[in-house]
Image (spheres, coloured by chain):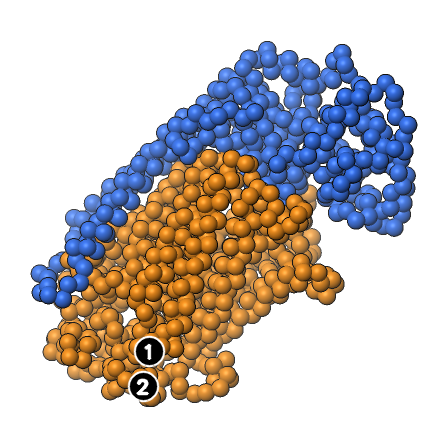
Chain colours: A blue, B orange
């Protein structure tokens, strides 16, 4: 549930980072400069248009000069001073955004068509970015395919993610809550559905606890592989392209997939067993189900082996071709597909 | 001293004079397609360019309609709808940028007006001019193929009947790796189209530079040239130096895509950001190819319709050249968030602000021109005044973008979309309309209906602001661009914007119907309906085939007082005595 804005201007999101106040201050400086010069030009133009409109009875105006050096110098020098000020504040604000403080908490950010992955120092990979408040966090950005842009309006930060290279940004959150992350560089079909969120925890302890739980689902008392698989499917973006209720989407539906006969675009066919599922997750381009595009990214290095096992357990649970695990909690089915985020 | 007087019979109220003019000079389609007459070439450009504007406009209305709600509008399937949207916004951008806005003022108004403003018979290289025209149509054919192919396939045609690919979904910017590794095959034809179109631009630039250097008449020193020619000159310099970079970039993209060379592919040791440097090295100067001629039109229109000498001639002339040169130093401001070094970012930011200053100087000078004028609210003047308002505002929003810390927050959002539409549509389009309405009597010998023209212009002004002002707010709130769907809370912004686009369409339709109507029913135009003094108003409306039987001598181009209103004949008449004393001497208003 996103916090309601406590905006300074009606057109800026809430300020949730240490750099946001400076950015917003400069925004307002430029805004009022803009307002001033716009009013000046509009008013002068309107006054002249009315005062000097053609009236046949008016005689020849006294000749007016065709130039005025003092005016020219004034309206050259004053704008120059103003833009130099704007440049200076903009550059200084940008340097604050670029120079990473020491002792930052490092998180890797991966991006691909069309999802985000956040890799924490302990190796845990999550689809949400969690950070503690009041702590500098350094984000190392990269892409697996095309250029994306990691954009958090509430933090006022943005940077391209580029394949084959790492870009770095940093942030120190000043407000706890949840804030949207958007992809802000066009990347194809579902560019506009690449929304993620950053969750700012009030304290470092709260953040550490979240990470502990997220990294070790088996350590939770109500753990079951089927339920973990269902939650993983939701959290890791599988359900962006695969449904669990039988409807077709970018990818084949998972309902009754496990154990079914699959026909591929190269004409071969096979039964969807554990090996097939594993191959589809790590090497999706090897065999494409007929009627579907070759757009699934690989999760090699992104999903751990035991996570693949949980997904397989989940797929078995929702397939009529498998008799299912009687110990699987009924709640696993209830964690089934919510539709992909709107 | 020979001072040119209007040709006999040119300034009358009789219907279209039966004397020889460029339209009636020869007949048959071949006499047009192979014409070396700059005026006919300008008219042919006009037809192709306006058709492209219409196509680009249809795409705009389609894409805004898709955005009425976060859900799909044109399809029940999200995937089909987003795919359609991606093609639509790409083609809207590509068609508008490459086929309309870059060529419009230079190729239509420049071609028609430049030689007659110089009192010349034609441009320096008429055959090269015809080649430029054919290059434009050649490029247009590639785009049409991509477009038509996409439409037919969307309507159900089997793709195998569209060899070479169709559709374009890369964005008009063609960023790698998406354009090399992921985009549809129509990318190839589109890039070839861009390559061919580039030559139209380059060769026109060559022609205009040569013409201005070599064909100025007696009395027209550089600082006695009309400002529209300074503007076209600056534009031509950019066209010449920047466009080849685009052509090469397109070829490199094709090579990457077809031959797998790897310049932009990190897996092969290449750099996708390098593409952006190449692309923007052309495309930033390109936006000055768009705005400079527009500014030239405004200088002519404001002075003529205020019946007043332009204020600050020297500063405006120097500013045009400054803008042309500085435009080459700022391309990196499109890449502030790309991972470029802070040093590079700072340099590009500083130069970006420097290019704002000459534009500001011009705006102040134009407003000052209206001071103590004798202002007529003709359609060109209404369009020019709209330009002043929209360009001032749109240009100032560039300050947010030049400032590094703010750019980071708003790049890739609707803030950018709003900014460039204010300067490309709000400014260049309005200047183009001002120029069309200003020179329409010269081109076709017909006056337009002022009332409906002004209604159209005001409708367009209102619709334009409705469409784009709200986008600044959406953008600074975080609404990214090129989004087919969006978070619920942005819905109202999109709906207001879409309604605005319908109002814009209505205004534009009115403006163009008004022009058509004048061809059928407009009053015959005199040689000089506005009482302006540039040489283009010293020949008949429409001009004869070779413009001037005798080469005129140039006076002060902004000496409106040389023309007196003759009440009985209801037209402007050249004051021969004043013209005799003015022509060939120092201008009446001294410039230092």
Q: Residue at x 49, y 44 (%)?
A: B494
- For mark 1, name the chain: B
Seen in the picture, residue B207 relative to B342 is either above or below; the reply is below
| Residue contact between numbered discs 2 and 1, judged by CB atoms under 8 Å | yes
**Which circle marks residue B17 in the picture?**
2
| B392 on left or right of B189 | left
Front in this rendered view, residue A63 or B219: A63
Seen in the picture, residue B261 relative to B587 is either above or below; the reply is above
- For label 2, count other residues whose C-alpha is less than 10 Å away and answer few (under 14), some (14-19) or many (20+): some
- For mark 2, name the chain: B
SS at circle 1: loop
- Quarter of the image for residue B111 reads bottom left
- Quarter of the image for residue A108 reads top right
Seen in the picture, residue B310 relative to A131 is either above or below; the reply is below
- For label 1, count other residues whose C-alpha is less than 10 Å away and answer few (under 14), some (14-19) or many (20+): many
Q: Position of residue B563 (x, y in %)?
A: 17, 73
Q: Residue at x 24, y 83 (%)?
A: B12
| B375 on left or right of B400 | left
Residue B121 appears in the rendering: yes
Seen in the picture, residue B158 relative to A224 is either above or below; the reply is below
Q: Which residue is mark 1?
A: B445
Q: Find the distance from the CA under tag 2 to the CA under tag 1.
A: 9 Å
| B38 on left or right of A251 | left
Q: Residue at x 29, y 44 (%)?
A: A38
| B325 on left or right of B339 | left
């Amino acid at each position: 549930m996103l916090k309601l804005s406590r905006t300074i201007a009606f057109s800026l999101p809430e300020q949730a980072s240490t750099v946001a106040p400076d950015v917003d201050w400069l925004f307002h400086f430029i805004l009022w400069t803009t307002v001033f010069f716009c009013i000046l030009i509009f008013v002068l133009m309107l006054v002249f248009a009315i005062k000097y409109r053609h009236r046949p009875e008016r005689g020849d105006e006294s000749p007016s000069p065709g130039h005025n050096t003092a005016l020219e110098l004034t309206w050259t020098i004053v704008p120059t001073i103003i833009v130099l000020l704007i440049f200076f504040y903009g550059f200084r604000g940008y340097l604050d955004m670029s120079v990473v403080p020491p002792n930052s908490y490092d998180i890797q950010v991966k991006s691909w068509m069309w999802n985000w992955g956040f890799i924490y120092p302990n190796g845990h990979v999550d689809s949400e970015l969690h950070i503690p408040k009041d702590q500098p966090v350094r984000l190392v950005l990269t892409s697996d395919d095309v250029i994306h842009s990691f954009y958090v309006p509430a933090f006022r930060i943005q940077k391209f993610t580029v394949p084959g290279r790492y870009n770095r940004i940093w942030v120190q959150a000043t407000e706890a809550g949840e804030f949207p992350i958007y992809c802000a560089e066009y990347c194809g079909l579902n560019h506009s559905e690449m929304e993620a969120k950053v969750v700012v925890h009030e304290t470092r302890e709260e953040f550490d606890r979240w990470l502990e739980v997220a990294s070790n689902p088996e350590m939770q008392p109500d753990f079951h592989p089927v339920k973990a698989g269902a939650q993983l499917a939701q959290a890791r973006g599988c359900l962006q392209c695969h449904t669990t209720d039988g409807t077709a989407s970018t990818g084949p539906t998972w309902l009754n997939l496990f154990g079914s006969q699959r026909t591929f675009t190269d004409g071969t066919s096979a039964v969807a067993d554990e090996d097939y599922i594993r191959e589809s997750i790590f090497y999706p381009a090897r065999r494409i189900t007929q009627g579907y595009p070759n757009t699934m990214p690989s999760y090699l290095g992104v999903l751990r082996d035991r996570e693949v096992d949980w997904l397989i357990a989940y797929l078995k649970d929702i397939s009529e071709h498998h008799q299912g695990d009687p110990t699987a909690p009924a709640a696993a089915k209830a964690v089934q597909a919510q539709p992909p985020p709107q | 001293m020979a001072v040119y007087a209007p040709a006999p019979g040119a300034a009358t109220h009789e219907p279209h004079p039966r004397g020889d003019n460029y339209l009636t000079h020869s007949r048959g389609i071949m006499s047009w397609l192979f014409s070396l007459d700059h005026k006919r070439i300008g008219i042919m450009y006009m037809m192709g360019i306006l058709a492209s504007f219409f196509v680009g406009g249809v795409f705009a209305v389609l894409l805004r309609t898709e955005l009425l709600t976060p859900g799909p509008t044109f399809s029940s399937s999200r995937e089909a709808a987003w795919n359609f949207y991606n093609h639509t916004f790409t083609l809207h951008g590509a068609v508008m940028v490459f086929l309309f806005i870059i060529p419009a003022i230079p190729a239509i108004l420049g071609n028609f007006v430049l030689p007659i403003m110089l009192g010349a018979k034609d441009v320096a290289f008429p055959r090269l001019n015809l080649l430029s025209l054919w290059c434009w149509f050649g490029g247009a054919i590639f785009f049409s193929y991509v477009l038509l192919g996409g439409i037919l396939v969307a309507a159900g045609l089997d793709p195998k009947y569209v060899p070479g690919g169709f559709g374009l979904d890369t964005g008009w910017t063609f960023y790698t790796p998406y354009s090399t590794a992921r985009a549809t095959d129509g990318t190839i034809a589109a890039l070839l189209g861009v390559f061919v179109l580039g030559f139209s631009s380059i060769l026109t630039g060559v022609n205009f530079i040569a013409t201005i250097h070599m064909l100025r008449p007696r009395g027209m020193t550089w600082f006695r040239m009309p400002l529209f020619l300074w503007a076209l000159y600056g534009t031509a310099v950019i066209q010449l130096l920047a466009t080849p970079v685009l052509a090469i970039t397109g070829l490199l993209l094709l090579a990457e895509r077809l031959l797998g060379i790897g310049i932009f592919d990190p897996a092969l040791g290449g750099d996708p950001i390098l593409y952006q440097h190449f692309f923007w090295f052309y495309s930033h100067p390109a936006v000055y190819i768009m705005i400079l001629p527009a500014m030239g039109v405004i200088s002519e229109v404001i002075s003529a319709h205020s019946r007043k000498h332009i204020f600050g001639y020297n500063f405006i002339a120097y500013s045009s050249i400054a803008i042309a040169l500085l435009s080459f130093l700022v391309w990196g401001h499109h890449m502030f968030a790309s991972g470029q070094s802070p040093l590079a970012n700072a340099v590009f930011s500083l130069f970006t602000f420097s290019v704002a200053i000459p534009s500001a100087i011009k705006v102040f000078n134009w407003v000052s021109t209206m001071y103590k004028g004798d202002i007529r609210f003709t359609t060109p003047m209404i369009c020019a005044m709209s330009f002043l308002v929209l360009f001032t505002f749109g240009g100032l929003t560039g300050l947010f973008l030049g400032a590094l810390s703010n750019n980071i927050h708003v790049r890739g959002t609707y803030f950018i979309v709003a900014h460039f539409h204010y300067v490309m549509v709000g400014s260049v389009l309005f200047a183009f309309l001002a120029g069309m309405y200003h020179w329409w009597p010269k081109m076709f010998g017909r006056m337009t209906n002022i009332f409906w023209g002004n209604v159209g212009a005001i409708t367009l002004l209102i619709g334009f602001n409705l469409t784009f002002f709200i986008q600044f707010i959406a953008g600074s709130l975080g609404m990214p661009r090129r989004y087919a769907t969006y978070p619920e809370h942005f819905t109202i912004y999109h709906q207001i914007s879409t309604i605005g686009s319908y109002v814009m369409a209505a205004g534009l339709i009115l403006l163009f119907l008004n022009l058509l109507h004048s061809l059928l029913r407009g009053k015959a135009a005199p040689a000089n309906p506005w009482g302006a003094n540039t040489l283009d108003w010293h020949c008949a409306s429409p001009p004869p085939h070779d413009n001037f039987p005798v080469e005129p001598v140039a006076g002060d181009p902004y000496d409106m007082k040389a023309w007196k209103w003759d009440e009985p004949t209801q037209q402007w008449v050249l004051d021969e005595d004043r013209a005799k004393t003015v022509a060939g001497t120092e201008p009446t208003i001294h410039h230092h």
